[in-house]
Image (cartoon, helix red, strand yellow):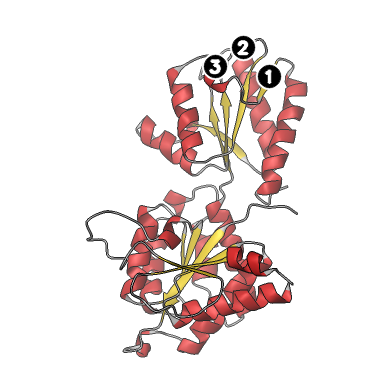
Amino acid sequence: MAHRKLNILVAGGVDPKDEKALERPAAEVCDFAAALAREVIRQKHNLLNGCRTEVDAASAKSAHEQLVADSASPESIRKRIVCYVNQGTRPAHSYGSIMESELVDWELGGPGLTAPEIIHYADAVVLLGGFSGTFRAANWARIERKPLLPFSIFGGAAKVVCLEEAKRIDQLYAGSVSKQDYESVLKALTDDWDTLARQAVTLAERMAIGRDAFIVMSFAESPQYKDLHRAIQEACARFGYEARRVDESNDRRRIIPEILRGVRHSAFVIADVSEHKPNVYWELGLATGMGKEVILVARKGTTLPFDINDVPVLFWDSFSDFTEELAKRIENIASYQGRA
């Protein structure tokens, strides 16, 4: 099955001055990092790596071994294991592509708010053990709004981050990942590393790829728009997506932050451009700027403005036909995202 390829960062470490801060032996942290990196590659995702710690070395080595076992080409290996090492720092290993970061360190108090490349390019950030640098990685992930998967089982900074993040899961991933889903993986007491790694990659996929489809359309109560809304909901439901409009939120939040949140956490966006309203085009531009997949629909006979005139648009008139055509478009996205 084709699915969306994610960039998954596995980060963490063991403080050589205070290994007792961990709740499991350092070797177990590295063993799980290796199992996790192996599963990332098996599931056709890419591994991002900081190339700084023994955990980084263990995960990169394991990913490399899996790719070699899969008969991957040297070029593929370089693309699938991507590492950034801070300026002036000796790389901890030699696997995959190793590039010099723009940054000397990951401190938040520098002259500019520039996130480390491996955080910026990550679709999900996994944290294991660690100490002060792991706290910085977590804060950069929060700033960049990246899904955080900090494991509690090994102790260290990742455990502290896990306890904090668990408080926000229902707010951040409502309808996609519950607090119970989150804790059943990240707080699991087990040493079955392969099973835990599979569960972690699945959780990362669910957190990085939402199950909501964000609808941009008129709120008019006309029968046609009600039928359009129902047709969109039906087509989305076939692939496990829940179609939502911003006016369907159960809480009374300010509208602009709610739109930002809805678009940011959506799997894709469906925008009806039958009416040339500024808010519709603003939300369409927002979705495009965030890199979201967008399906444009419009009433049959609608004259489109020049700046979207060359974009494929699905026109609606007969809703039975429209629903089937829309489902085909959604199926392409669902296949890409692993939901087909």
Q: Is residue 151 placed above or below 202 in the rendered structure?
A: below
Name the residue: 56% across, 22% down: 308
- The residues tagged by marks 3 and 1 sit, at their Cα atoms, a distance apart of 17 Å
Residue 110 in percent (x, y) is at 23, 60
Residue type, label 2: Thr
Residue 324 in percent (x, y) is at 76, 29
In front here: 317 or 67? 67
Mark 3 sits on what residue?
A: 306
Residue 181 in percent (x, y) is at 55, 61
Mark 1 sits on what residue?
A: 315
- The residues tagged by marks 2 and 1 sit, at their Cα atoms, a distance apart of 8 Å
Q: Is mark 1 on a helix, strand or loop?
A: strand
Residue 54 in percent (x, y) is at 46, 83
Name the residue: 67% across, 64% down: 43
- Residue 25 relative to residue 36: left or right: left
Q: Would residue 33 be seen by someone viewing this image from the given angle? A: no
- Residue 268 relative to residue 49: left or right: right
Q: Is mark 2 on a helix, strand or loop?
A: loop
Residue type, label 1: Phe
